[in-house]
Image (cartoon, helix red, strand yellow):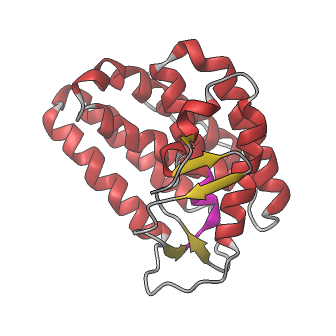
Amino acid sequence: MLSGVSATKLLERPGGEHLAARIAEAIHKLNCCGVASPRNHTLVEEMGILQNRLSQVARTKPELSKRISKLLDACEELAETIRERKVRGIHRDFYPDQLVVDSARIYIVDLDLYSEGEPALDAGNFLGHLTEQWIRQPQHTFPLQNCERSFEKRFLELDVDSNESDVEFFKTLTLVRHVSLSTQYPERRAFTEKLLELCEDRVAFMVKRLLGESLRIGGVE
């Protein structure tokens, strides 16, 4: 059994941004470890997971079905802007609870989904989980936002093949997926609407920035 503390508890504390930078270094080491996997997780598969999760929400919450349909269409449009690159080893489920911190050591756990894929997916997934955490725990907003900036800055310094747009895209997909997750846990259902609004805003902004066009998502243009 590993000794240490979950990164989730440490990142919400003042000064957590220093740990966040170290976590970026840790996932970069995993991405570059060179250990092959028989599994290949593509963007097509990632979008398929998103489609399945959000379709379930639309069925259980028909009042949100039109907004979810528009959101999924916009995510598909954004996915077409992601350039192909050489794949590397990725965790595929990388977020703070998958990290145990013991002084100078950081352990990455639960590698059962380890695949060949896009490293920006790991980075975006981690950032999306931090955002979702401070939405549920607004008392930790400031330190967690600092952690997001610190992690992303260090990750992009290390992974020269990834860019900010790719990381932000995968972060957005993670947040969209959390719309579904929020409906599955009673204590999170109060945040479904807020998460959906945040995703609509993010996607609308990204479409305008990347595609140079206006797209109405939900109530936001």
Report if residue 119 lies within the magenta region. Answer: yes
Name the residue nearer the viewer: 52 or 108. 108
Judge left or right: residue 82 versus residue 110. Answer: right
Q: Residue at x 49, y 67 (%)?
A: 43
When the figure is inspected, residue 175 is found, relative to residue 22, above or below; the finding is: above
Instruction: Read off the magenta span.
Output: 117-123
User: Residue 202, percent across and down?
Assistant: 57, 34
Name the residue nearer the viewer: 29 or 129. 29
Judge left or right: residue 155 versus residue 178. Answer: right
User: Residue 139, percent across and down?
Assistant: 56, 12
Report if residue 16 lies within the magenta region. Answer: no
Judge left or right: residue 148 versus residue 92. Answer: right
Q: Residue at x 67, y 76 (%)?
A: 85
| Overall secondary structure of the magenta section | helix
User: Residue 56, percent across and down?
Assistant: 20, 45
Name the residue nearer the viewer: 18 or 205. 18
Report which quarter residue 11 is drawn in: top right
When the figure is inspected, residue 155 is found, relative to residue 91, above or below; the finding is: above
